[in-house]
Image: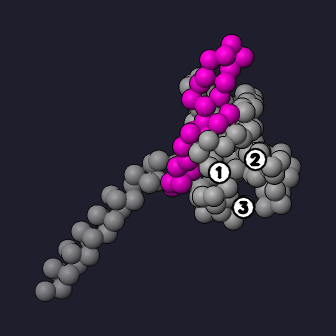
Amino acid sequence: MQAQKLIRMAAAVAVALALGAGTVAAHHAFSAEFDANRPVRFQGTVTKVEWINPHAWIHMDVQMDDGSTELWMIECGNPHNLFRRGFNKDVIQIGMEIVVDGYGSKDGTRRANGRDLTLPDGRTLFMGSSGTGAPRDGRDPTER
């Protein structure tokens, strides 16, 4: 009887570890995907916002100098921290014109790690350059 309990407990622990492995593997260091020496600044229109863990994502159409439009994906901090910094589902709306400052991807894809988001009313919110090794600008992120 005791051996069966031990086997069930070991199986439950193994399942829990297996289920959690995907979440742990999904998180990354900033420097694995983004380049601190490649600052970017985009002005564009929000097309989609994903409030998912471990990072929220803002999708935006950016009009380029040649008149073409590119779809960019901006990685933000995790939703919990964003909500603490003043974000909520009403702050960023589809069709809203925003400005994003951040860092471009190392692989040249249209993805960036967001640092600051400027809203149409001029407010700037800290998106939280995410991941270990993300650049710091010396300001306290809770004061943005």
Q: Is residue 115 rendered to the left or right of residue 107?
A: right
The magenta stretch is: 44-71
- Element type where label 1 sits in the image: loop
- Element type where label 2 sits in the image: loop
Image quarter of residue 134: top right
Q: Quadrant of the N terminus?
A: bottom left
Image quarter of residue 116: top right
- Circle 2 crowding by C-alpha within 10 Å: few under 14, some 14–19, many from 20: some
Q: Residue at 81%, 56% (x, y): give it.
A: 144
Instruction: Report the residue marked by disc 3.
Output: 86
Instruction: Report the residue marked by disc 2.
Output: 119
Can the viewer see residue 30 in this picture? no
Against 121, is 66 above or below? above
Query: CA–CA distance between discs 1 and 2?
Result: 8 Å
Residue placed most toward the observer, 109 or 97? 97
The amino acid type found where label 1 is placed reads: Ile
Residue 92's tag is 1
The amino acid type found where label 2 is placed reads: Leu
- Circle 3 crowding by C-alpha within 10 Å: few under 14, some 14–19, many from 20: some
Query: CA–CA distance between discs 1 and 3?
Result: 11 Å
Q: Is residue 113 rendered to the left or right of residue 57?
A: right
Q: Residue most toward the top?
A: 66
The way the protein has been coloured in the rendering is: one colour
Query: Is label 1 or label 3 in front?
Result: 1
The reply to whether dot 1 and dot 2 touch (C-beta < 8 Å) is yes
- State the predominant SS element of the stretch in magenta: strand
